[in-house]
Amino acid sequence: MHAHENFAVMLNANARKVTPSVRRKIEGFVPPENIFYSRSMEESLDIASEIQSRQYPTVFTGGGDGTFVKFVNDYCESRSPVQKARSEALPDMGVLHLGTGNAVASIVSSGNYECDLQSYLASGYRNTQQLQLLEADGMRFPFGGLGWDAEILNDYNRVKRSLGMNRFLRPVVRNVGGYFAAFFGKTMPRHVTQMFNRV
């Protein structure tokens, strides 16, 4: 196996853009033993632990910023006490443009998941850059918000939890529609109410 073939691809199976067609394309040129599909929070932690045990030097995630952040935290959580004490570095990370929120991918990706994976597989091409992560409450993340964006995200998570169980509404609330529902259904009404209460 060439060094550039020794990499893992971890995809969020619930992400809207990780379609059956996308899966087939990736499975067509990435060795199947290197592809992992995460369908839940628990499965994500198990996958991160397995990827770490295989010591892949490079890992690609696909499914958006949340998938990347979840993997990084799960990978760090699954380290042994010795590894944590040594503060061992993460593997090189590639972020495929396959999510609703692709802020990290827009920094490190070409925007085309096929081109990114095939160019790496063909030549091991890597144009790496350091990404400083913030840390708060034991979580690592590439950026954060303290204003409306953070409120909307929290409201989005509440909407997703409350309406995501409904099979008819699930596809709507798990993408951009969920953000609109959170903003117009929770965030904005709360601010309007607070504004009138101050009058």
Image: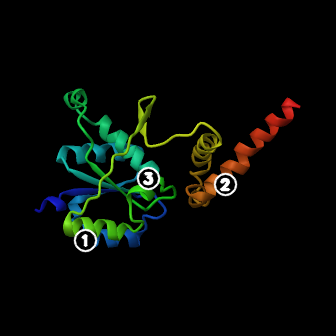
User: Which residue is pictured at 18% across the width and 48% down the height?
Assistant: 54
Disc 3 crowd, CA 10 A, few/some/many (<14, 14-19, 20+): many
Residue extending furthest left? Answer: 1
The span from disc 1 to disc 3 (Cα, nearest Å) is: 24 Å
Seen from the viewer's position, the closer of residues 79 and 33 is: 79
User: Which residue is pictured at 23% across the width and 44% down the height?
Assistant: 52
The x, y position of residue 24, in whole percent, is: 33, 72
The span from disc 2 to disc 3 (Cα, nearest Å) is: 22 Å
Question: At label 1, which amino acid type do we have?
Answer: Phe
Question: At label 3, which amino acid type do we have?
Answer: Val
Give the mark, 1 or 3, whose residue is nearer the N terminus: 1
Disc 1 crowd, CA 10 A, few/some/many (<14, 14-19, 20+): few
Read off the residue under disc 3.
Answer: 104
> Does 32 sit left or right of 104 as displayed?
left
Give the mark, 2 or 1, whose residue is nearer the N terminus: 1
Q: Disc 1, disc 3: CB below 8 Å?
A: no
Position of the C terminus by quadrant: top right
* Label 2 SS: helix
Residue extending furthest right? Answer: 199
- Numbered badge on residue 29: 1
1 vs 3, front mark? 3
